[in-house]
Image (cartoon, coloured by chain):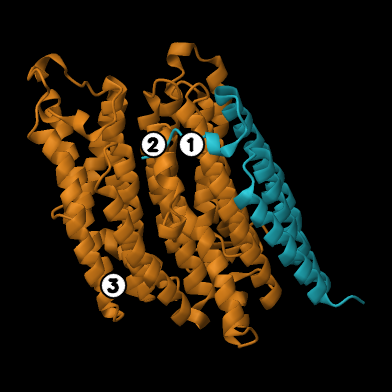
């Protein structure tokens, strides 16, 4: 069997890539994709922790299913906000949203 | 499985859900000019819900219900009442908002977020904790971007969403590691697993930092505060008030529950982290508040520094510390909602929101000037208002836990704070309108504002004079953490 550390390294790498995407991309949709990658890293973590410990204790799986559901809600709200910003400003570049500054 | 205790432990949430459904069902049938009645319905419903919960939903011994998801104790109960009070006041302030007040969704979203906050205060399981934090946050993202035809509001909504999801995802990664290391999602079982020494201190410190990033965003302490001024300025003002009070208080509820219950084994490392963050938040928040000209941005930076003060109680890691945080939150919620409510009432009539536009307010509406005095002196920490007593308790907890340096930083910062709070009052009381014809530019208060503001100002004064019962309740709540 593949050792668990591989999964954890994969998850950490995915989390890092997602974070890098969120911090460097300027397109709002791409930023959302970065957040999605980070959430998937969390799911890999949760499921691998479940698989490699007590398999009868379902809380890891339940947790990851709930993360799915919340992610779906979160991203749909996020896309709606992107669309409402796009309608007002005609842009999806995050840097162009600069009205609120001091 | 479904016993009376189970029912009682989620009674406030059930009632809030019923109010939300009632708003949703009734609102489409009302004529346009009656739609603001949804605000009366929400505020009145919440008031009744609070009374019903106080009568039938009081906790006895701390118990875990719903399979260990919910912890039913005084801490959760007291905070729930606080959130419901804040939501009722916000509903009243929202009613006469020009664009959002006539839309039932606004009240519904606020109630949905309130359910999340209530569960945040009482969840005893990582799954429930994550779910409740998101339930509280997602409706607030929408509410911040609620004014679709206002560029600043849409921008604020998107910014809040972006920072919020990033912070909660980082925290969730921390939760997943916490689950992995301890093999359980129950906070009390996690505490036992961490105390047994299975987990190395370095790993635990990393996890704690991930969780601090997420919660630090919710309560807007300094390295995670960037969203606050932008969102407060862009969001509809009642929503900004709700964000800076109830949402922040809910974040502190989670900090208390999570760190006091689950991480006592590593208390040295996280209290040190919190001490540094607290000192930095107070200082940076106050210094950045000094040059602000927009009153909402000024209140945003002031709320960042107040998060720093409240954190001193958590740093103390004692029963007095926890009690002082809860008391601080209660006083702060009333005070800051009052300040935001006054700004909202002023802005509704004049459309202006700069500090200098407040000139002559004491002549344009003497009552508002007086309430402004109470709100800003309480924020500055002057007796006989709630803010003073709250600061005393927090500082006492800090001294008791040997964090004298932190308390000194706090006191120096309070003095800086007095400067810019009094600066606002200078415009209200000493300056006059350019034409000196304030009688011709009155600022009328509508009925919902009158009710909300008077209740809040009474709350601020009561908490600063007859504070013993409030502190006893906070203390009873804090006792449940140990």
**Residue B169 placement: quadrant:** bottom right
Position of B258 with respect to A45 (left or right) is: left
Colour assignment, chain B: orange
User: Which is nearer the N-term, disc 2 or disc 3?
Assistant: 2
**Residue B70 placement: quadrant:** bottom right
Could you say where residue B252 lies in the image, as x and y percent from the top left?
A: 43, 59
Q: Residue at x 52, y 56 (%)?
A: B120
Q: Mark 1 falls on what kind of element?
A: helix
**Res. B233 mark:** 2
User: Which is nearer the N-term, disc 3 or disc 1?
Assistant: 1
Q: Residue at x 63, y 37 (%)?
A: A77
Q: Residue at x 47, y 64 (%)?
A: B255
Could you say where residue B381 lies in the image, as x and y percent from the top left?
A: 19, 55
Label 1 marks which chain's residue? B
Q: Give the vertical position of B21 relative to B202 (above or below).
A: above
Is the residue under label 3 in contact with that under label 2 (CB below 8 Å)? no
Looking at the image, which residue sits at the far right?
A1
Q: In what quadrant of the picture does the N terminus of chain A appear?
A: bottom right
Position of B71 with respect to B314 (left or right) is: right
Q: In what quadrant of the picture does the C terminus of chain A appear?
A: top left
Q: Mark 2 falls on what kind of element?
A: helix
Residue designated by label 1: B156
Residue designated by label 3: B406
Could you say where residue B73 lies in the image, as x and y percent from the top left?
A: 47, 64
Label 2 marks which chain's residue? B
């Amino acid at each position: 069997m593949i050792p668990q550390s591989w999964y954890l390294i994969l998850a950490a790498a995915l989390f890092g890539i997602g974070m890098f995407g969120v911090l460097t991309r300027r397109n709002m949709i791409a930023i959302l994709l970065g957040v999605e990658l980070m959430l998937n890293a969390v799911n890999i973590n949760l499921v691998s922790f479940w698989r490699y410990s007590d398999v009868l204790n379902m809380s890891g799986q339940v947790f990851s299913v709930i993360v799915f559901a919340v992610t779906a809600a979160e991203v749909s709200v996020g896309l709606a906000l992107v669309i409402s910003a796009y309608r007002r400003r005609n842009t999806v570049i995050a840097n162009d949203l600069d009205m609120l500054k001091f | 499985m479904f016993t009376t205790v189970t029912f009682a432990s989620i009674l406030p949430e059930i009632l809030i859900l019923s109010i939300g459904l009632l708003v949703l069902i009734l609102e489409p049938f009302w004529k346009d000019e009656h739609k603001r009645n949804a605000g009366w319905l929400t505020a009145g419903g919440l008031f009744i819900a609070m009374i019903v919960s106080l009568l039938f939903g009081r906790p006895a011994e701390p118990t875990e219900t719903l399979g260990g998801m919910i912890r039913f104790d005084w801490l959760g109960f007291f905070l729930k009442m606080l959130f419901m009070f804040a939501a009722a006041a916000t509903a009243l302030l929202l009613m006469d908002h020009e664009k959002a007040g006539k839309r039932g969704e606004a009240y519904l979203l606020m109630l949905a977020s309130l359910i999340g906050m209530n569960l945040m205060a009482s969840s005893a399981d990582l799954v429930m904790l994550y779910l409740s934090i998101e339930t509280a946050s997602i409706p607030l993202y929408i509410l911040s971007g609620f004014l679709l035809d206002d560029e600043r509001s849409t921008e604020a909504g998107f910014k809040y969403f972006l920072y919020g999801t990033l912070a909660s995802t980082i925290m969730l990664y921390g939760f997943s590691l916490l689950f992995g290391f301890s093999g359980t999602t129950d906070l009390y079982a996690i505490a036992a697993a961490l105390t047994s020494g299975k987990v190395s201190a370095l790993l635990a410190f990393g996890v704690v930092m991930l969780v601090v990033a997420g919660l630090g965003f919710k309560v807007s302490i300094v390295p995670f505060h960037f969203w606050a001024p932008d969102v407060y300025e862009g969001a509809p003002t009642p929503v900004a008030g709700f964000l800076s009070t109830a949402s922040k208080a809910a974040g502190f509820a989670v900090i208390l529950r999570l760190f006091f219950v689950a991480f006592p084994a590593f208390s040295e490392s996280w209290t040190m982290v919190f001490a540094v963050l607290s000192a930095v938040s107070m200082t940076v928040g106050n210094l950045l508040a000094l040059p602000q000209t927009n009153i909402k941005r000024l209140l945003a930076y002031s709320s960042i520094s107040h998060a720093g003060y409240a954190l001193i109680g958590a740093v103390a890691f004692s029963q007095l510390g926890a009690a002082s945080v809860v008391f601080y939150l209660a006083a702060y919620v009333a005070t800051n909602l009052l300040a935001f409510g006054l700004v909202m009432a002023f802005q509704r009539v004049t459309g202006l929101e700069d500090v200098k536009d407040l000139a002559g307010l004491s002549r344009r509406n003497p009552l508002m000037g007086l309430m402004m005095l109470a709100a800003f002196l309480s924020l500055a920490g002057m007796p006989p208002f709630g803010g003073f007593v709250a600061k005393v308790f927090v500082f006492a907890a800090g001294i008791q836990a040997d964090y004298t340096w932190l308390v000194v930083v706090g006191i120096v910062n309070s003095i800086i704070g007095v400067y810019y709070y009094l600066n606002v009052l200078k415009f209200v009381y000493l300056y006059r309108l350019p034409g000196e014809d304030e009688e011709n530019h009155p600022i009328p208060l509508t009925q919902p504002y009158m009710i909300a503001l008077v209740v809040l100002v009474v709350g601020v004064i009561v908490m600063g004079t007859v504070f013993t019962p409030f502190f006893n309740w906070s203390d009873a709540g804090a006792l449940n953490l140990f």
